């Protein structure tokens, strides 16, 4: 057989292992860091994958994929589950040190880290584990820092290789097709293809090759070494070689030689660098060589020195850096960046923050003006992705300065509808938001309608009913008091979380409505029997005071407040800083409700409430927040439901459930109807009579005093 002649005294030189990291690995690491690891920088077990060289001019890489990392949902230790039986993915165990800061990354003691991984390989050799599971011979190490704000990653691979002292020398090295006879080459090629085609052995990267006198080759496991001893058999130590170079074996051979020397004390080793072409064994690309090992006696008593840090793209010893910001889809980048602050909250400040509740929440905003624009943006900042805006107004020239979702372009040609313009703006700000704009007027009491428009108003009422039913939380952000009445009634009927924000010139009100008089939509007669007595006293079925709604403190029904108004009364004239403050508080109050164990039924807390702060991770949960900019003051108040409330009391909700649209139309067309139904008319009469009687008593007292003076 022909052989390539190489200097017998030349040192055996190995082609370094090369790394490749799939983009999915970085995405998975980012998600794992944000959602599970937080500031925990403990080492993470990972799995790398490589395969034999399959091209005459290109080496294979050790690759990290998304599945190289452990699952986020794993409740056990962070250990990835490598796949087995894949001929193109030989699993190799590794360890990842991901630091929290770039300074920590730079300060890592790379020599000690390499030495520690080399010690693990040496221990596996000494214990015999490397013979049973030979993948541990290719154990590797990665250090990294993930800059999740810029989607930039610093990383550095090490492939620890135990150094023989003195180094192994190369006797000869040639293509397997030249070293072997034609019969031997054909038999070995067939044996290797069978080995690679079996699920039980396809991804075992180190093996033995025996060739009997009849040129028949057999591929065996390393642990079969003792059974392979025969004077008339050729024995080769084989490995999957990722390298394509014709004069150098690949990096995995280094630790294989250390194993052979330490385990079987061989001085001369014939090795087989297995390589493929198009998925099949190629004896012209594969190499066979012989190496001499002359380590001194007793060298096994100490851990050998190790090398293995990979060179960077400039060919120097140092880390690499990759940025994914340019290659990533802008929408995906926006989603990751938007969630970053929220996920960071869970690291230390708020571990119990439930992002899934927020992302799945469906919010209905009634009003897309100054308050509606601010609330929509605050909701998106908290991770809410499903927002519906309802408004029938158009963007005016005076709007963009105060209403943050509009620009001058929205005002041109008569102005765009606010609902649709606001949605377009939200999607430009955050493309992943699921926003919908609905142009619709809200029917209001005190604004009578004629028979010609009755069907249209009824349709609007039904549409509003359906919208409220299909959403989880409703914000009342309209300009007038009467426009909040119908939504308040419908929310009380459906028992929806309802938030109100209202502005004066220099004062504001933010409040959450209490639960409706019926805790669930069941049989009306049964509920009426169970609830009427308790609700008449402003209490729920459990005997607790029900929190009031926006109308519970009023003694008159909502009426027309838009007619006969001067210009300053027609516009929402408020101090510019008021709307952002009230909007932010309204959204914060909603998030507090969502994280309270009792949700909409949570009792009201006041300032400095110890019980509220301990029960809710976000702090106290007030009922009403009233603030004044002129005094730069803010206070929390509690207002319980009224049995005579024109919007949420048991009587009104029962009337709506019994009569439906007929009741709504009567409330709209007859200003005093709601006062009559709820008993406010009688209450006002009683109060007036009491006032007259009181005046009489005062007059009599004055007369007596005058007489006395005379």
Image: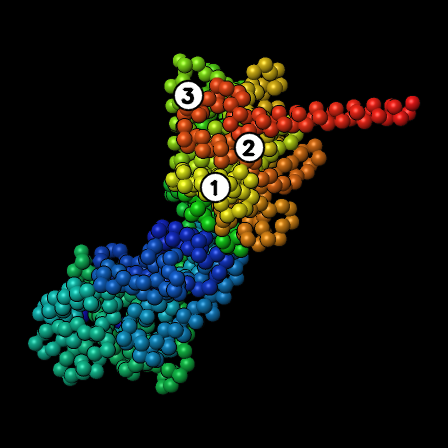
Instruction: Give the SS element for disc 3.
Output: helix
Q: Residues within 10 Å of mark 3 (few under 14, many from 20)?
A: many
Instruction: Give the SS element for disc 2.
Output: loop
Quadrant location of residue 701? top right
Left or right: residue 4 compared with residue 535? left
Expressed as whole percent of the image width and height from the top left, the position of residue 79 reads: 37, 64
Residue beneath disc 1: 531
Residue beneath disc 3: 457
Image: 469 above or below 416? below
As drawn, the label of residue 644 is 2
Distance of mark 2 from mark 3, alpha carbons? 26 Å
Instruction: Find out whether the residues at labels 2 and 1 contact each other: C-beta distance under 8 Å.
Output: no
Quadrant location of residue 244? bottom left
Task: Tell me which colouring the rendered structure shows.
Answer: rainbow
Expressed as whole percent of the image width and height from the top left, the position of residue 170 reads: 28, 73
> Considering only order in the chain, which callout, 1 or 2, is on the residue closer to the N terminus?
1
Q: Residue at x 53, y 25 (%)?
A: 676
- Tell me if I can see residue 655 in this picture: yes
> Considering only order in the chain, which callout, 3 or 2, is on the residue closer to the N terminus?
3
Is residue 706 or residue 329 the one in the foreground? 706
């Amino acid at each position: 057989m022909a052989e390539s002649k190489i200097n017998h005294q030349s040192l055996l030189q190995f082609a370094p292992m090369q790394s490749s990291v799939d983009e999915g690995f970085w995405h998975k690491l980012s998600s794992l860091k944000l959602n599970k690891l937080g500031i925990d920088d403990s080492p993470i077990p990972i799995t790398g994958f490589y395969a034999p060289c399959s091209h005459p001019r290109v080496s294979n890489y050790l690759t990290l994929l998304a599945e190289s990392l452990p699952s986020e949902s794993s409740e056990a230790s962070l250990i990835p589950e490598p796949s087995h039986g894949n001929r193109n993915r030989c699993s190799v165990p590794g360890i990842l040190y991901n630091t929290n800061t770039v300074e920590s990354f730079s300060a890592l003691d790379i020599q000690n880290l390499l030495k520690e991984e080399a010690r693990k390989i040496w221990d596996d050799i000494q214990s015999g584990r490397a013979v049973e599971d030979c993948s541990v011979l290719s154990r590797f190490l990665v250090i990294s820092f993930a800059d999740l704000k810029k989607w930039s990653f610093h990383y550095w691979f090490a492939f620890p290789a135990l150094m023989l002292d003195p180094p192994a020398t190369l006797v000869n090295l040639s293509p397997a097709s030249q070293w072997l006879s034609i019969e031997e080459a054909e038999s070995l090629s067939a044996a290797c293809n069978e080995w690679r085609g079996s699920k039980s052995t396809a991804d075992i990267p180190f093996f033995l090759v025996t060739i009997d006198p009849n040129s028949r080759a057999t591929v065996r496991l390393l642990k079969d070494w003792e059974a392979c001893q025969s004077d008339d058999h050729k024995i080769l130590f084989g490995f999957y070689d990722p390298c394509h170079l014709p004069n150098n074996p690949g990096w995995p051979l280094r630790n294989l030689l250390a194993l052979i020397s330490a385990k079987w004390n061989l001085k001369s080793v014939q090795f087989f660098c297995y390589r493929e072409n198009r998925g099949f064994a190629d004896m012209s690309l594969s190499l066979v060589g012989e190496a001499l090992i002359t380590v001194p006696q007793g060298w096994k008593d100490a851990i050998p020195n190790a090398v293995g840090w990979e060179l960077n793209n400039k060919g120097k010893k140092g880390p690499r850096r990759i940025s994914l910001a340019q290659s990533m889809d802008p929408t995906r980048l926006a989603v990751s960046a938007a969630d970053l602050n929220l996920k960071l909250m869970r690291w230390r400040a708020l571990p119990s923050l439930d992002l899934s509740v927020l992302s799945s929440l469906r919010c209905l905003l009634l009003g897309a003006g100054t308050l509606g624009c601010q609330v929509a943006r605050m909701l998106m900042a908290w991770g809410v992705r499903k927002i519906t805006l309802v408004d029938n107004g158009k963007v005016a020239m005076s709007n963009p300065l105060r209403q943050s979702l509009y620009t001058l372009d929205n005002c041109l040609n008569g102005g765009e509808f606010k609902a649709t313009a606001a949605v377009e703006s939200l999607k430009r700000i955050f493309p992943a938001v699921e926003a919908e704009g609905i142009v619709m007027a809200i029917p209001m009491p005190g604004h009578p309608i004629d028979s010609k428009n009755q069907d249209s108003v009824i349709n609007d009422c039904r549409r509003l009913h359906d919208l409220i039913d299909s959403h989880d939380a409703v914000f009342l952000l309209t300009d007038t008091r009467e426009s909040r009445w119908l939504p308040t009634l419908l929310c009380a009927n459906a028992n929806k979380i309802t938030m109100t924000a209202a502005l004066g010139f220099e004062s504001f009100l933010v409040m959450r409505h209490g639960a409706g008089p019926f805790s669930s939509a069941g049989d009306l007669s049964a509920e009426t029997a169970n609830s009427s007595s308790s609700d008449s006293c402003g209490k729920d079925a459990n005997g607790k005071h029900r929190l009031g709604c926006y109308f519970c403190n009023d003694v008159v029904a909502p009426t027309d407040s838009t007619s006969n108004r001067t210009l300053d009364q027609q516009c929402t004239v408020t101090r510019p800083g008021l709307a952002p403050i009230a909007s932010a508080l309204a959204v914060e109050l909603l998030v507090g409700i969502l994280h309270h164990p009792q949700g909409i039924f949570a009792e009201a807390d006041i300032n400095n409430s110890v019980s509220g702060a301990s029960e809710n991770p976000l702090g106290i949960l007030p009922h009403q927040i009233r603030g004044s900019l002129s005094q730069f003051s803010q206070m929390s108040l509690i207002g319980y439901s009224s049995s005579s409330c024109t919007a949420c009391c048991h009587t009104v909700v029962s009337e709506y459930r019994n009569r439906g649209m007929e009741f709504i139309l009567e409330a709209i067309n007859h200003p005093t109807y709601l006062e009559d139904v709820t008993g406010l008319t009688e209450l006002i009469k009683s109060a007036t009579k009491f006032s007259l009687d009181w005046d009489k008593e005062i007059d009599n007292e004055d007369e007596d005093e005058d007489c006395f003076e005379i």
